[in-house]
Amino acid sequence: MKKLITYIFMSIPYFGLAQQEYFNVHEWGTFTTLNTSDGLPLHGLFKDETPLPPFVYSMPFFSYDKTVGWPDTTQLKNVSTKMETPVLYFYTNKPKEIRVKVGFNGGTISQWYPQRYAGEAGPTEPYVDFARNYHGSIEWKASILSKDTVLPYSPPSDQVNLEWSAPRQTNANLIKGSNGEIEKYLFYRGIGNITLPIKIEFNKTGKLVLTNSASEDLGYVLVYEKSENISQTPTIWWQGSLKADTYKVIPKPTASDWTEVYEATDNFETALAKAGLYPDEARAMLSTWHNSYFEKETGLKVFWILPRKLTDQILPLELSVRPDNLERVIVGRSEILSPEMEAQLYRDYNQGNFAKYEEHKYYNAFLERMAQLKAGAKLEYTAIDEPLTGVIDESSSNKINLFPNPAADQIAITLSEGDKNSMLSLTIINSVSEKVIEVKNHHIGANLNIEELPNGIYLALISSENKRYKIKFLKK
């Protein structure tokens, strides 16, 4: 009897906890961009990544032929970003009625499921120019069903593909849309023109340069390359974190083995969970991408987790019921043309062999780049290389400093030892080795105005007392 009483007593807190109401909302998705080999964003990214099932709803300017995915009657201009597969999950032990509104600052929410309750209207002009600060939106009225609800999904099972079924593999509640459609999540997709804080480019020695201009760290970055040779193991260029206002120079690595590839996938899943997803959500996210992002698509890609603050700015979310916990994990997938790929495209363009790219998802972007090069655009690879910080003359004990760094309007040069009133020569060059400022006689400690310089990374070349230094700094 004593043991029974003890067991009942110890069970009370857990019984109470089990009855406590909870409500959590989790979201994941991707932004895709394409850069030239010297870091310029390209447009024309409106072709579907993978065909969506035919039951997905679309804006009027999208063709219902999801295999092709070209615009129907409306011309789309300056599409530099594809927003792919954001899904919203709901977790609660009490059924709820909820209104959900998502905005897209810089783009349109062009495809969705279940049917929306409200949202942006279709275009009234024969074109949509996303460089004109477009603001899209979507709104659902939905019922979050009881946790133990067992109902079949509404979409026809013979129309569901892996990309649709993989996100269902979570412990989230079922939801019912305002017209009765049953699904595991709210789905939406879009296109637009937004500025992201990571710049990806090659330098003059063929290394890859990643620059994080955000005020927040990028918690996880993965540089992944899939060769056109399907028998070749993918190459992991680099993985790690990238601190705010810093850059990373990455030399082309030797071929990876499968152990390294599997380790990178595990690390990616761990990073997604660390960013806020449940483990089964992280697995579902990577499973959704497995065929398209990692197995079928060739080329060089940089995956990175957006800072939460940036996600909320681009995709403002409103919920009529305040959740106990809201997690939003959006991953950037920044693809870049290698110098070799870009050169091959241009050769094919000049030789009349460009028709073979017509089925490529980035065909319109390729055409845009070819037109730029044909018009005389020059490939301008950055001069950023390792090392860019510190002192050239390591034998000198008279260290030199530049502050503030990052800088907005002014910088100053100081010496840790020696005559603080002496003069120095100062030259500042930009990322394409252009000289933007040159001062022959500059007082140590005096402010130098850099307000007119565009934001970016610069190199200060400093000469003082027959010694030479170079210091990298960021202008914001």
Image: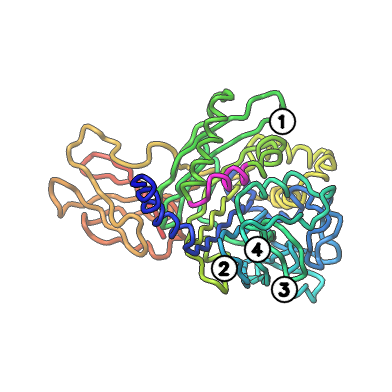
Asked if 297 appears above or below 312 in the picture, the reply is: above
Marks 3 and 4 close (CB-CB < 8 Å): no
Asked if 470 appears above or below 177 in the picture, the reply is: above
Task: Locate residue 440 relative to residue 61 in the image: left or right.
Answer: left
- Residue at (17, 52) in percent of width and height: 422
Name the chief secondary structure element in magenta. helix
Towards the viewer: 425 or 63: 63
Write the start and end of the magenta stretch as one range: 276-286
Q: Which residue is mark 4?
A: 145
**Which of marks 1 and 4 precedes in the sequence?**
4
Circle 4 Cα neighbour tier, 10 Å, few/some/many (<14 / 14–19 / ≥20): many
Distance of label 2 from label 1 (alpha carbons): 39 Å
Marks 2 and 1 close (CB-CB < 8 Å): no
Q: x%, y% of residue 291?
A: 71, 38
**What amino acid does circle 2 point to?**
Leu
**What amino acid does circle 1 point to?**
Glu
Q: Which mark is residue 117?
A: 3
Distance of label 2 from label 4 (alpha carbons): 21 Å
Circle 1 Cα neighbour tier, 10 Å, few/some/many (<14 / 14–19 / ≥20): few
Q: Give the quarter of the image for residue 394.
A: top left
Q: Which residue is mark 1?
A: 228
Q: Which mark is residue 317?
A: 2
Q: For the residues carrying marks 2 and 1, which lies nearer the camera in this image?
A: 2
Counting labels gives 4
Distance of label 3 from label 4 (alpha carbons): 18 Å
**Which of marks 3 and 1 precedes in the sequence?**
3
Q: x%, y% of residue 203?
A: 52, 39
| Quadrant position of the C terminus in the picture | bottom left
Q: x%, y% of residue 31?
A: 61, 54
Distance of label 4 from label 1 (alpha carbons): 46 Å
